[in-house]
Image: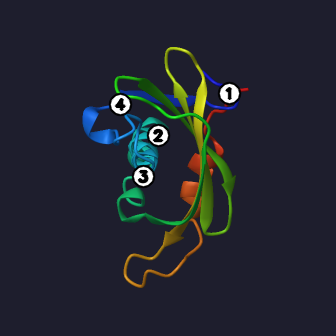
Amino acid sequence: MRPGFAFSTRFRVRYAEIDGQRIVFNSRYLEYADVAVTEFWDWTGIATALPEVWPSTEFNVRRTEIDYLKPFRLGDTVEAFVRIEKLGTSSLTKRFELAHAETGALHTVITMVSVHVDLETGRPVPLPDSIRAVLEALPSSS
Protein backbone atom coordinates (compact mmCIF):
# COMPACT_ATOMS: atom_id res chain seq x y z
CA MET A 1 0.00 0.00 0.00
CA ARG A 2 1.02 3.59 -0.58
CA PRO A 3 0.93 6.03 2.34
CA GLY A 4 -2.43 7.80 2.49
CA PHE A 5 -4.32 5.09 0.58
CA ALA A 6 -6.41 2.22 1.93
CA PHE A 7 -7.51 0.94 -1.51
CA SER A 8 -5.79 -0.22 -4.67
CA THR A 9 -6.52 -2.44 -7.65
CA ARG A 10 -4.27 -3.96 -10.31
CA PHE A 11 -4.50 -4.54 -14.05
CA ARG A 12 -2.12 -5.13 -16.94
CA VAL A 13 -1.40 -2.86 -19.89
CA ARG A 14 -2.87 -4.42 -23.04
CA TYR A 15 -1.69 -4.12 -26.63
CA ALA A 16 -4.71 -2.00 -27.65
CA GLU A 17 -3.69 0.64 -25.07
CA ILE A 18 -0.27 1.47 -26.49
CA ASP A 19 0.56 3.93 -29.26
CA GLY A 20 3.16 4.07 -32.04
CA GLN A 21 5.85 4.89 -29.48
CA ARG A 22 5.01 1.63 -27.67
CA ILE A 23 3.86 3.41 -24.54
CA VAL A 24 0.35 3.80 -23.11
CA PHE A 25 -1.54 6.42 -25.13
CA ASN A 26 -2.30 9.49 -22.99
CA SER A 27 -6.11 9.22 -23.10
CA ARG A 28 -5.94 5.71 -21.64
CA TYR A 29 -4.90 7.08 -18.25
CA LEU A 30 -8.42 8.48 -17.77
CA GLU A 31 -9.78 5.04 -18.66
CA TYR A 32 -7.48 3.59 -16.00
CA ALA A 33 -8.93 6.07 -13.48
CA ASP A 34 -12.44 4.97 -14.49
CA VAL A 35 -11.58 1.29 -14.00
CA ALA A 36 -10.00 2.07 -10.64
CA VAL A 37 -12.89 4.19 -9.35
CA THR A 38 -15.40 1.50 -10.32
CA GLU A 39 -13.45 -0.97 -8.16
CA PHE A 40 -13.11 1.68 -5.45
CA TRP A 41 -16.89 2.19 -5.23
CA ASP A 42 -17.36 -1.59 -4.91
CA TRP A 43 -14.72 -1.67 -2.16
CA THR A 44 -16.48 1.10 -0.19
CA GLY A 45 -19.63 -1.04 0.13
CA ILE A 46 -21.75 2.06 -0.48
CA ALA A 47 -24.20 0.26 -2.80
CA THR A 48 -24.95 -2.29 -0.07
CA ALA A 49 -25.04 0.31 2.69
CA LEU A 50 -27.38 2.65 0.78
CA PRO A 51 -29.47 0.54 -1.62
CA GLU A 52 -32.28 3.11 -1.67
CA VAL A 53 -29.96 6.07 -2.44
CA TRP A 54 -26.86 4.91 -4.31
CA PRO A 55 -28.48 3.54 -7.54
CA SER A 56 -29.90 6.99 -8.35
CA THR A 57 -26.73 8.85 -7.38
CA GLU A 58 -24.90 10.45 -10.29
CA PHE A 59 -21.53 12.20 -10.40
CA ASN A 60 -20.34 14.12 -13.45
CA VAL A 61 -16.67 14.89 -13.92
CA ARG A 62 -16.08 18.64 -13.69
CA ARG A 63 -12.29 18.90 -13.82
CA THR A 64 -9.36 16.56 -14.19
CA GLU A 65 -5.65 17.20 -13.82
CA ILE A 66 -3.15 14.59 -14.99
CA ASP A 67 0.55 14.61 -14.19
CA TYR A 68 2.35 12.17 -16.49
CA LEU A 69 5.56 11.32 -14.68
CA LYS A 70 6.67 8.17 -16.51
CA PRO A 71 4.92 6.11 -19.22
CA PHE A 72 3.59 2.61 -18.78
CA ARG A 73 4.50 0.03 -21.42
CA LEU A 74 2.93 -3.10 -22.83
CA GLY A 75 2.77 -5.83 -20.20
CA ASP A 76 3.35 -3.57 -17.20
CA THR A 77 1.10 -4.21 -14.24
CA VAL A 78 -0.50 -0.99 -13.03
CA GLU A 79 -1.45 -0.63 -9.39
CA ALA A 80 -4.07 2.10 -9.13
CA PHE A 81 -4.52 3.72 -5.73
CA VAL A 82 -7.70 5.74 -5.08
CA ARG A 83 -8.91 7.96 -2.26
CA ILE A 84 -11.44 10.69 -1.64
CA GLU A 85 -9.32 13.75 -1.00
CA LYS A 86 -12.05 16.31 -0.33
CA LEU A 87 -15.81 16.46 0.12
CA GLY A 88 -17.55 19.67 -0.86
CA THR A 89 -21.21 20.61 -0.69
CA SER A 90 -22.04 18.95 -4.01
CA SER A 91 -18.61 17.79 -5.16
CA LEU A 92 -15.91 15.34 -4.28
CA THR A 93 -12.27 15.31 -5.23
CA LYS A 94 -10.60 11.97 -5.91
CA ARG A 95 -6.87 11.34 -6.10
CA PHE A 96 -5.48 8.51 -8.19
CA GLU A 97 -1.88 7.39 -8.09
CA LEU A 98 -0.92 4.94 -10.81
CA ALA A 99 2.21 3.04 -9.91
CA HIS A 100 4.16 0.17 -11.43
CA ALA A 101 3.00 -2.83 -9.39
CA GLU A 102 6.38 -4.58 -9.40
CA THR A 103 8.73 -1.62 -8.82
CA GLY A 104 6.39 0.71 -6.92
CA ALA A 105 7.51 3.60 -9.14
CA LEU A 106 4.88 6.33 -9.39
CA HIS A 107 3.98 6.91 -13.05
CA THR A 108 0.89 9.13 -13.00
CA VAL A 109 -1.08 11.30 -10.58
CA ILE A 110 -4.67 12.21 -11.43
CA THR A 111 -6.86 14.62 -9.49
CA MET A 112 -10.52 14.51 -10.47
CA VAL A 113 -13.35 16.73 -9.24
CA SER A 114 -16.82 15.24 -9.70
CA VAL A 115 -20.12 16.98 -9.01
CA HIS A 116 -23.21 15.26 -7.64
CA VAL A 117 -26.06 16.06 -10.02
CA ASP A 118 -29.81 15.56 -10.17
CA LEU A 119 -30.49 12.97 -12.88
CA GLU A 120 -33.53 14.79 -14.27
CA THR A 121 -32.14 18.32 -14.45
CA GLY A 122 -28.40 17.65 -14.71
CA ARG A 123 -27.87 20.44 -12.17
CA PRO A 124 -25.58 20.18 -9.12
CA VAL A 125 -27.25 19.18 -5.86
CA PRO A 126 -25.80 18.74 -2.37
CA LEU A 127 -24.47 15.33 -1.40
CA PRO A 128 -27.05 13.48 0.70
CA ASP A 129 -26.05 13.19 4.36
CA SER A 130 -26.16 9.39 4.09
CA ILE A 131 -23.57 9.36 1.27
CA ARG A 132 -21.41 11.91 3.08
CA ALA A 133 -21.47 9.75 6.23
CA VAL A 134 -20.29 6.64 4.34
CA LEU A 135 -17.52 8.55 2.57
CA GLU A 136 -16.34 10.25 5.76
CA ALA A 137 -16.15 6.87 7.50
CA LEU A 138 -13.88 5.27 4.88
CA PRO A 139 -10.62 3.95 6.25
CA SER A 140 -7.45 5.81 5.39
CA SER A 141 -3.91 4.59 5.44
CA SER A 142 -0.98 6.65 6.57
Tag of residue 13: 4
Q: Position of residue 30 (x, y in %)?
A: 45, 50
**How many residues crowd mark 2 within 10 Å: few (<14), some (14–19), many (20+)?**
many
Q: Which residue position holds label 3?
A: 27
What residue is drawn where x is 29% and y is 32%?
Answer: 14
- CA–CA distance in space, label 4 to label 1: 27 Å
Helix, strand or loop at label 4? It is loop
Disc 4 residue type? Val
Label 3 vs 4, first from the N-terminus: 4
Helix, strand or loop at label 1? It is loop
Circles 3 and 4, Cβ within 8 Å, touching? The answer is no
Q: Position of residue 133 (x, y in %)?
A: 61, 51
Quadrant of the rendered image containing residue 70: top right
Indicate the colouring scheme.
Answer: rainbow
**How many residues crowd mark 1 within 10 Å: few (<14), some (14–19), many (20+)?**
few
Q: Nearer the viewer, residue 14 or 137?
A: 14
Q: Residue furthest top?
A: 102
Circles 4 and 1, Cβ within 8 Å, touching? The answer is no
Q: Position of residue 83 (x, y in %)?
A: 60, 41
Disc 3 residue type? Ser
